[in-house]
Image (tube, rainbow, N blue to C red):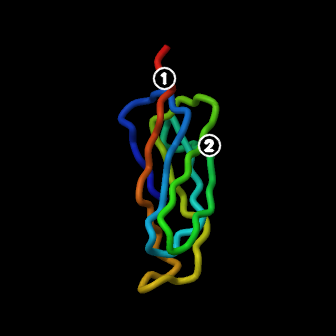
Amino acid sequence: TVTVDLGKVQPVHAIGYGTPDVGATKTIAVSVSEDGTNFTEVGRNAFPQKRSATALARFAVKNARYIRATFVDQHPAQDQYGPNYGFLSEIEAYAPEAK
């Protein structure tokens, strides 16, 4: 897992995340938490092998301080990277637009 601390609790309604064109990462789940202990999954995506790709998890506004990416599943080994390597090229948290 990779956990990002946003520094304070704030409203979030989408998380963008992606994988590079190397490695064996297949499925990533993204979760949010106010306290860093109790996480709620808000999205999950299976990425293609040998191609960089991104996903956007959209959900009802949730208050969150922590964003977590969990590596759920892997493709077979690719290049010199076995299935025990996890690759994440980006993770972005989006706040709702101000009214």
Whether residue 4 is situated above or below residue 89 in the rendered picture: above
Quarter of image, res 70: bottom right
Tell whether 42 sits left or right of 20: right
Give amino acid for label 2.
Thr
Quarter of image, res 45: bottom right
Task: Kindly report the distance in space between the C-alpha atoms of the residues bearing marks 1 and 2.
Answer: 22 Å
Give amino acid for label 1.
Glu
- Characterize the local packing of mark 2: few (<14), some (14-19) or many (20 or more) Cα atoms within 10 angstroms: some
- Characterize the local packing of mark 1: few (<14), some (14-19) or many (20 or more) Cα atoms within 10 angstroms: few
User: In the orientation shown, which residue stands out farthest toward the left?
Assistant: 7
Whether residue 57 is situated above or below residue 46 in the rendered picture: above
Whether residue 36 is situated above or below residue 28 in the rendered picture: above
Q: Secondary structure at mark 1?
A: loop
Tell whether 85 sits left or right of 59: left
Find residue 72 and report its horizontal and vertical position in percent. Answer: 60, 64
Find residue 2 and report its horizontal and vertical position in percent. Answer: 45, 56
Q: Secondary structure at mark 2?
A: strand
Number of marks: 2
User: In the orientation shown, which residue stands out farthest toward the bottom?
Assistant: 80
Q: Could you tell which of marks 1 and 2 lies nearer the N-terminus?
A: 2
Q: Residue at x 51, y 26 (%)?
A: 96
The residue that mark 1 highlights is: 97
Tell whether 98 sits left or right of 75: left
Q: Nearer the viewer, residue 74 or 19?
A: 19
Find residue 10 and report its horizontal and vertical position in percent. Answer: 46, 28
The residue that mark 2 highlights is: 40
